Image: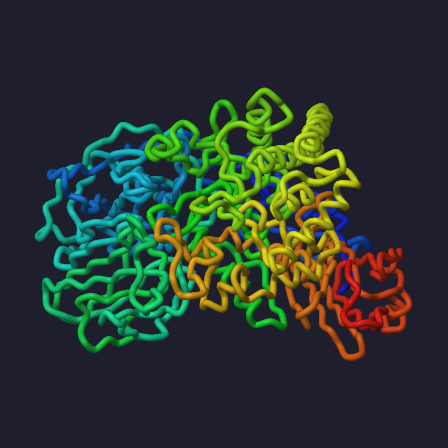
């Protein structure tokens, strides 16, 4: 990127702290002895995504920067601590002087991971050294027998035919005087391993390859480059097989030091002709080891199998230590659950073996962990291990894209707290470089529908900005020329179209990820640049829909998943009862409304007017097609009513009827949901928005099937794919499609943060520059504590019920942001009587009473409101 951006947060012990100006200085030295660029004092309250305009950075340079700011009173801050960023190759294809190199096995059946290496001499002191590297497949670098970096599954999974990331490593401290050895393992990974439902390998390409440059800057100012080329050599490795789905086979007897030439035969590499024009710098945060878990028990199943219980359905691998005779092989097999008899259950993995095989070299304690594979599991079956198993010798290593944890939610209900835990761990397990649907079976694909359903919840829990920026660029790259969107990104249609044929794209609610995801990221983080990047893709998607069928304002053609896994489906069907044309047209209207909003943000006035008119026409066609003249929705399902209400598709008469009918539909189901993937994310928000807030709480607290807490009471530690993945009698849903780590239904997390805790963004002032705190207590909840680390700083919202109808609300608004708080069940008199200091009265700029709710405008700072609710009866008045 040639226009770097900086963001910063202000900290102040003063309330109502607002930035009035800032200054940025860049230098090539940490001490800022010589300023490279100075913004001067800029009058602006902008503190996020500040572009360094009128400055041209140079490739491969490190720049040190510092920032200071002025508040509204003109008070100047001290300079920030010095930080730095470093430019990469700046997407300059000509910068790559290295060649792609590969190792072709002599035996075509050889599935081992090759080693590639080179040696070089250093004869003078160095100032710095960087490795720029990418691969077709996966790579693991070693320099002088030390692993380079803490990243895994590099260079990541992208739309390989169009985009391929590279990484940069500072290896200054790994180099040594004299001889140096640089090497790399290559793994199949997503590029040429098993993927999707294809029973063969080589999805994107047939040969793994390496492209690498080591740039060494000497103290005297000269430079040397070590390049991947035909001078490198290759040899087999102890990694006899490694595959994302199948696992890894490792023979420790074949281990060889990178300097060892006696036990391995090194042969010349071969040059591979492959484009460099698609290479881009790393965009997402890398996959790293994020956490370690120790097993909580060693079980013996009724079938006599020895099984480790990790206590948590996790994604990653098991690191273990063992002693034994040379040539002895042990196995670890991985599963999510035990069946109703307590036996190890792997049927739901389908074709994914998830098996680790390790052959001992002997001679002492050996420690092993995999290289190029990951497993989704809670239970680990041990095969071939000694009779006495020491749990301390096993460690579960959790891996995922290393996104910053931003959200926290706790409440008075232990079951709801466990649900929040499960949602978070569902995200951990499925955000491994791409937003996968599940991390265990032979699928693990970037399903677009699941991603758009969960994107806001995900963005409350973690900083997903870089994660979705990278994935949306792949979505744009894989978008068809006609504007259609694949079911999953990166797209595998060339190899997995069996069963769908040419229709393997562009389902409503799935393809709409092209619009919903960038808009949501914009709301949560305020990133206009990403919105601008994706704008043409967003327009192309709605244009694709517009051109389907004979009526440009209805979407009633093509394949659609509908309300996937809706509980009101017909027997033996995965698709819920809600009419698929209804779902498709509703999402058509919704996407057009978001594109219209995007056009306004980007200043595209002509487009904004066009999409506004288009939206009006779609809504009119929707009403004519799906709403009776008397104002009744013609599709009698919970999901239909939820979509029509949430997407604002009804006139006032029909809306009132739909609100009443939705309540009746939920009641007729015994106050349970019947929604699937499409309706569930919006169900509780719609209930809360339409006067059924207590009913939303009732759904949350249900513990029998179907409900969120039913899974919790069954011992779930992540969110399930099916409401009854494990049925009440202990039997299991069909093994064909029964993941126990499938985050779509975890979208209820958004409701916990936005409604229960009340932390809401403002689409007119995105990124939480304006914060809305509107907590909505309900029956069964005594207290809630929640926080969110936004681009401006920490937002916090907590509420507590007190004796005699008392309420206590705590609010924190970060510096350089403003907010409003809506206090449930209060009026102005009770607030003033509660002891709000007189010097805070100016922050009460207006009082808006809606069913005894008070809205108070706040500057930045922390506030506490203690008051008695005006409602005499049980409970607290809420919207």
Image quadrant where one finds the C terminus: bottom right
Toward the left, the furthest residue is: 262
Residue 486's place in the image compared with 440, above or below, is above
Residue 224 locus on image (x, y percent): 32, 40
Which residue is more in the foreground, 802 or 19?
Answer: 802
Residue 634 locus on image (x, y percent): 66, 38
Toward the bottom, the furthest residue is: 803
Residue 534 locus on image (x, y percent): 57, 33
Residue depicted at x 66% and y 70%:
780
Please give left or right for residue 221 compared with residue 551 in the image: left
Which residue is more in the foreground, 769 or 395?
Answer: 395
- Quarter of image, res 616: top right
Which residue is more in the foreground, 101 or 634?
Answer: 634
Q: Is residue 49 visible?
A: no
Residue depicted at x 73% and y 64%:
811
Which residue is more in the foreground, 672 or 381?
Answer: 672
Q: Is residue 588 visible?
A: yes
Please give left or right for residue 150 compared with residue 412 in the image: left
**What colouring method underlies this structural image?**
rainbow
Residue depicted at x 84% and y 72%:
872
Residue 705's place in the image compared with 158, above or below, is below
Please give left or right for residue 273 compared with residue 468 in the image: left
Query: In the rendered picture of this protein, how many numbered marks are placed on residues?
Result: 0
Please give left or right for residue 310 compared with residue 464 in the image: left
Residue 808 locus on image (x, y percent): 76, 72
């Amino acid at each position: 990127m040639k226009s770097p951006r900086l963001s910063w947060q202000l900290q102040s012990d003063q309330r109502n702290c607002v930035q009035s100006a800032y200054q940025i200085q860049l230098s090539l030295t940490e001490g800022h002895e010589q300023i490279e660029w100075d913004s001067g004092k800029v009058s602006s309250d902008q503190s996020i995504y500040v572009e360094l305009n009128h400055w041209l950075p140079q490739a491969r340079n490190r720049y040190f920067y510092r920032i200071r700011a002025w508040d509204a009173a003109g008070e100047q801050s001290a300079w920030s601590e010095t930080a730095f960023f470093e430019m990469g190759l700046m997407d300059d294809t000509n910068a790559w002087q290295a060649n792609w190199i590969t190792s072709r096995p002599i035996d075509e059946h050889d599935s081992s991971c090759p080693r590639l290496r080179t040696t070089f001499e250093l004869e003078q002191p160095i100032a710095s050294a960087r490795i720029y590297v990418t691969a077709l497949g996966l790579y693991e670098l070693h320099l002088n027998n030390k692993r380079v970096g803490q990243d895994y599954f590099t260079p990541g999974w992208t739309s390989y035919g169009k985009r391929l990331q590279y990484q940069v490593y500072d290896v200054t401290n790994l180099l040594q005087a004299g001889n140096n050895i640089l090497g790399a393992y290559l793994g199949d990974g997503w590029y040429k391993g098993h993927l999707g439902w294809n029973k063969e390998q080589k999805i994107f390409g047939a040969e793994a390859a390496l492209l690498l440059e080591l740039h060494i800057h000497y103290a005297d100012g000269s430079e040397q480059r070590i390049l991947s080329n035909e001078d490198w050599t290759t040899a087999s490795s102890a990694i006899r097989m490694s595959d994302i789905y199948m696992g890894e086979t490792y023979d420790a007897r074949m281990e060889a030091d990178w300097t060892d030439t006696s036990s391995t035969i090194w042969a010349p590499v071969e040059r591979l002709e492959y484009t460099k024009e698609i290479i881009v710098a790393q965009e997402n945060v890398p996959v790293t080891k994020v956490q370690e878990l120790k097993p909580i028990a060693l079980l013996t199943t009724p079938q006599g199998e020895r099984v480790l219980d990790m206590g948590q359905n996790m994604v990653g691998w098991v690191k273990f230590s063992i002693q034994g005779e040379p040539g002895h092989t042990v196995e670890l097999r991985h599963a999510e659950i035990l069946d109703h008899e307590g036996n190890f259950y792997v049927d739901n993995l389908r074709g994914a073996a998830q098996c680790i095989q390790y052959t001992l070299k002997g001679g002492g304690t050996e420690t092993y962990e995999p290289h190029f594979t990951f497993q989704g599991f809670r239970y680990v079956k041990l095969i071939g291990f000694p009779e006495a198993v020491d749990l301390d010798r096993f460690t579960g290593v959790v891996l995922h894209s290393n996104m910053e944890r931003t959200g926290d939610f706790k409440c008075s209900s232990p079951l709801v707290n466990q649900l929040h835990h499960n949602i978070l761990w569902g995200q951990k397990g499925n955000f491994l470089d791409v937003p996968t649907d599940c991390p265990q079976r032979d699928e693990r694909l970037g399903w677009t529908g699941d991603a758009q359903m969960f994107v806001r919840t995900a963005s409350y829990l973690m900083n997903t900005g870089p994660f979705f920026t990278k994935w949306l660029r792949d979505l744009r790259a894989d978008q068809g020329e006609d504007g259609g969107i694949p079911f999953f990104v990166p797209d595998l249609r060339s190899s997995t179209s069996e069963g769908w044929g040419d229709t393997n794209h562009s389902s409503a609610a799935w393809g709409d990820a092209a619009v919903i995801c960038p808009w949501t990221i914009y709301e949560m983080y305020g990133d206009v640049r990403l919105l601008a990047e994706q704008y043409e893709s967003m327009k192309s998607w709605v244009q694709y829909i517009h051109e389907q069928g004979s009526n440009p304002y209805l979407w009633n053609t093509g394949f659609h998943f509908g309300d996937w896994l809706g509980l009101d489906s017909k027997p033996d069907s995965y698709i819920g009862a809600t009419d698929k044309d209804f779902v498709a047209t509703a999402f058509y209207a919704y996407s057009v409304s978001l594109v219209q909003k995007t056009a306004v943000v980007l200043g595209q006035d002509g487009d904004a007017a066009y999409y506004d008119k288009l939206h009006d026409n779609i809504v009119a066609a929707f009403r004519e097609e799906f709403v009776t003249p008397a104002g009744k929705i013609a599709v009698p399902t919970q999901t239909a009513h939820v979509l029509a209400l949430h997407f604002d598709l009804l006139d006032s008469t029909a809306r009132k009827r739909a609100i009443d009918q939705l309540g009746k539909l939920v009641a007729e189901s015994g106050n349970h949901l019947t929604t699937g993937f499409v309706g569930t994310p919006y169900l509780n928000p719609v209930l809360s928005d339409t006067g059924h807030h207590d009913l939303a709480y009732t759904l949350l607290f249900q513990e029998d099937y179907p409900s969120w807490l039913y899974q919790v009471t069954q011992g779930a530690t992540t969110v399930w794919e099916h409401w009854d993945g494990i049925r009440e009698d202990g039997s299991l849903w069909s093994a064909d499609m029964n993941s126990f780590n499938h985050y779509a239904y975890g979208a209820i997390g958004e409701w916990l943060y936005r409604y229960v805790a009340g932390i809401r963004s403002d689409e007119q002032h995105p990124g939480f520059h304006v914060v809305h705190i509107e907590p909505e207590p309900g029956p069964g909840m005594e207290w809630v504590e929640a926080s969110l680390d936004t681009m401006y700083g920490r937002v916090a919202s907590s509420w507590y019920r007190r004796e005699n109808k008392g309420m206590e609300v705590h609010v924190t608004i970060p510096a350089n942001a403003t907010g409003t708080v809506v206090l449930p069940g209060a009026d102005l008199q009770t607030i003033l009587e509660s002891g709000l200091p007189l010097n805070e009265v100016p922050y009460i700029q207006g009082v808006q009473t809606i069913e005894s709710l008070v809205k108070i405008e706040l500057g930045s700072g922390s506030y506490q409101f203690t008051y008695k609710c005006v409602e005499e009866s049980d409970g607290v008045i809420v919207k």
